[in-house]
Amino acid sequence: DAGITQSPRHKVTETGTPVTLRCHQTENHRYMYWYRQDPGHGLRLIHYSYGVKDTDKGEVSDGYSVSRSKTEDFLLTLESATSSQTSVYFCAIKGWQTQETQYFGPGTRLLVL
Amino acid sequence: AQSVSQHNHHVILSEAASLELGCNYSYGGTVNLFWYVQYPGQHLQLLLKYFSGDPLVKGIKGFEAEFIKSKFSFNLRKPSVQWSDTAEYFCAVSSGGYNKLIFGAGTRLAVHP
């Protein structure tokens, strides 16, 4: 599965608590992405990274921050979780060439009560 | 802003029926086009992709798609579906150096034996 793992795979948390999701890759790929999947919306890009310490916002970045201190790890943080952030979160990776495919991790199911 | 429209949200077919799922995008420049599939409880897997060249692309499991530039369309087809094709199908578009994906809302396909 393209060497991507996500942790945790499931999480239940309460409104107002911080949450960090981890994406780990073993492929040394340059690009990493965080998406959220919600019914009727498909997947929407939250943040992405194009190298260590190089990140940028996506379509739905409000309430989220990211960090990438190593090539293999891309962290997504919900500073203060809200019920609207209940979703399934997918990480994706892509190699160094322009015409390459994004490969997706197994997902993290997050429930914010 | 780019957008992707998938015309059918739910499709129900009997085994051996033919399938065509519509996908239209709004972007006038050079695009990369993808179809991903998500089987129940699983992550997204790439079905097929178009970067350039022959507009008729063949993917895994007997799927194919045709890029029609004049219609901004990338419809997915399969001549004879199987029960195992029951899944959600996502059309996606990317452009630019960071290859950020814009997804359609998805089409849920149910194939009855």
Image (cartoon, coloured by chain):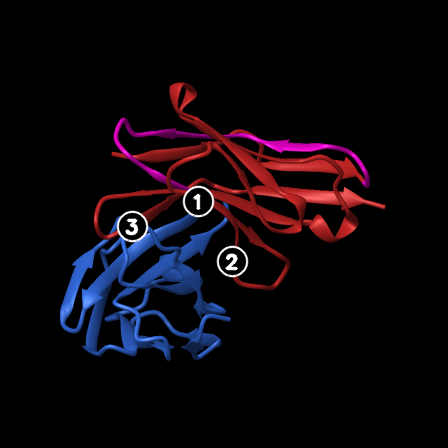
> What colour denotes chain A?
blue
Q: Residue at x 36, y 58 (%)?
A: A35
The residues bearing labels 1 and 3 have C-alpha atoms spaced at a distance of 16 Å
> What colour denotes chain B?
red
* Range covered by the magenta-colored residues: B15-33
Crowding near pointer 1: few (<14 within 10 Å), some, many (20+)?
few
The residues bearing labels 2 and 3 have C-alpha atoms spaced at a distance of 16 Å
Looking at the picture, which amino acid does disc 1 mark?
His
Looking at the picture, which amino acid does disc 2 mark?
Leu
Q: Residue furthest front?
A: B53
Residue B27 sits inside the magenta stretch: yes
The label number, if any, that marks residue B100 in the structure image: 3
Q: Chain of mark 2?
A: B
**Residue A67 lies in what quarter of the image?**
bottom left
Q: Which residue is mark 1?
A: A41
Q: Is residue A99 above or below residue A73?
A: above
Q: In the image, B59: left or right of A12?
A: right
Residue B101 point in image, percent of width and height:
34, 48
Element marked by disc 3: strand
